[in-house]
Amino acid sequence: MVQISESFTAIDDDVIDGLDQWRTLPIKQQPAWSDPAALEAASAELATLPPLVFAGEVDTLRRRLALAAEGRAFLLQGGDCAETFAGATADQIRDRVKTILQMAVVLTYGASMPVIKMGRMAGQFAKPRSSDTETRGDVTLPAYRGDIVNGYDFTPESRQADPARLVKGYHTSASTINLIRAFTQGGFADLRQVHSWNKGFAANPANAQYEHLAREIDKAIRFMEAAGADFDELKRVEFYTSHEGLLMDYERPLTRIDSRTGDPYVLSSHFVWIGERTRDLDGAHVDFLSRVRNPIGVKLGPSTSPDDMLRLIDKLDPEREPGRLTFITRMGAGTIRDALPPLLEAIKGADATPLWVSDPMHGNGMTTPTGYKTRRFEEIMDEVKGFFEAHRAAGTHPGGIHIELTGDDVTECLGGSEHIDEATLATRYESLCDPRLNHMQSLELAFLVAEELAAD
Ligand code: PEP
Ligand code: CO
């Protein structure tokens, strides 16, 4: 049976039924909402609110990612491990966008190819957890699952999953994406502003290197302008949003049928990925995201077998559509050189060209004796290097990086040119979840990745 929507596009009932198939499948990492009526009200409200992105933008992104999969572009995906409602301020959003723009300039220059800029922003609010509960002393409470589910404060009230947070998550995402669009369309991201994004002391090696690069870019732009080139194109940049597609009570109501084509899209962001803990082939997340048109990422940890990977391709990209599927590998610095090559060999024998992206963060976690969750900058870099080495050896394309970062001067990851050590971690540790690279470490990483790309 086919019904006709207001915009005269046929909506296929089978498509809608399919979108709800996940409800019958095993599902992981969902909160225990305590008030079913409140959940229903929040879902109904989300379902009537406007989408946060336009399906046409999602299609453009898919085409851009297809280029990256072929080695003709590079994806830079970065942002907080977990965004917070309190952190959605103008200054923090601006500084994260700036950091990503600076990294993109460095990478574009090093790679001499387009860099697709994508934030873990405007929706990265829900977190998978290793345990459903957290115990402090003799008190056990539900684990913090991100601001879109419950509060971080360790009290029974705060830790209760509250459906009103779903709606607040939507509005916070809306104001975040609004500011991102203003910055990236309104002149702030104009390449002629390349100097003004820099901050901090030129004495820092990464800053000094950036200043040098910015001067070269300025010179090139002035030369081309003098030669009569029209640089209006430089004024706007494409910037895409992404988050882990984890919380079904948020993603399902924000999934809409595109009036142009009748196809379903998750319109909470341009790109969504499936996490390492929820990528079961027969589980709810893989089924749901197999049915939408967005480009989809899947995290692949060190235990991924070639067979798992090939079955994920069959399920998520049966048509082998360019740009549809991204594999985000997060193997660990000590493991990537063993765990990635078998996957790359297997892909060469398959009829698929997924985009390969390195997440050098999630396989390199550690806890200090003083109890801080951290990561070593050297290990993060080493995993990126291992990623490039494996692709070079296999003849496949290293197509992007996926980084947890902030534009702020936090002290969450060890090392880098500022030599953050264990004693320094306490001075400015702000993440509620995983440790992020700070502004300077992010820039340093971009220079190191640019070297790898230039060597390719
Ligand atoms: C994340 O990206 O924040 C995350 C939880 O990653 P993974 O699923 O790879 O553990
Ligand atoms: Co994380």
Image (cartoon, helix red, strand yellow):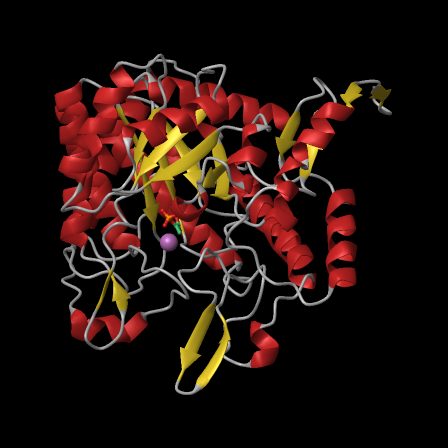
Q: Decide if residue 251 is in sight here.
A: yes
Furthest residue toward bottom: 138
Quadrant location, the C terminus: top left
Rendering quarter of residue 177: top right
Figure check: 97 above or below 116: below
Figure check: 187 above or below 138: above
Of residue 325 and residue 131, the one placed in the foreground of this image is 131
206 relative position to 409: left or right: left
Figure check: 147 above or below 104: below
Quadrant location, the N terminus: top right
Of residue 251 and residue 58, the one placed in the foreground of this image is 251
From the top left corner, tell me how far across and down residue 277 is, in percent.
41, 48
What residue do we see at 41% from left, 50% from top?
Answer: 96
Of residue 440 and residue 280, the one placed in the foreground of this image is 280
263 relative position to 391: left or right: right
What residue do we see at 53% from left, 60% from top?
Answer: 89
Q: Decide if residue 197 is in sight here.
A: no
Rendering quarter of residue 455: top left
Of residue 285 and residue 52, the one placed in the foreground of this image is 285
From the top left corner, tell me how far across and down residue 6 is, in percent.
87, 25
Figure check: 128 above or below 64: below
Rendering quarter of residue 337: top left
What residue do we see at 16% from left, 26% from top?
Answer: 454
138 relative position to 172: left or right: left
What residue do we see at 58% from left, 25% from top?
Answer: 293
429 relative position to 419: left or right: right
Q: How many marks?
A: 0
From the top left corner, tell me how far across and down residue 206 is, in percent.
18, 48
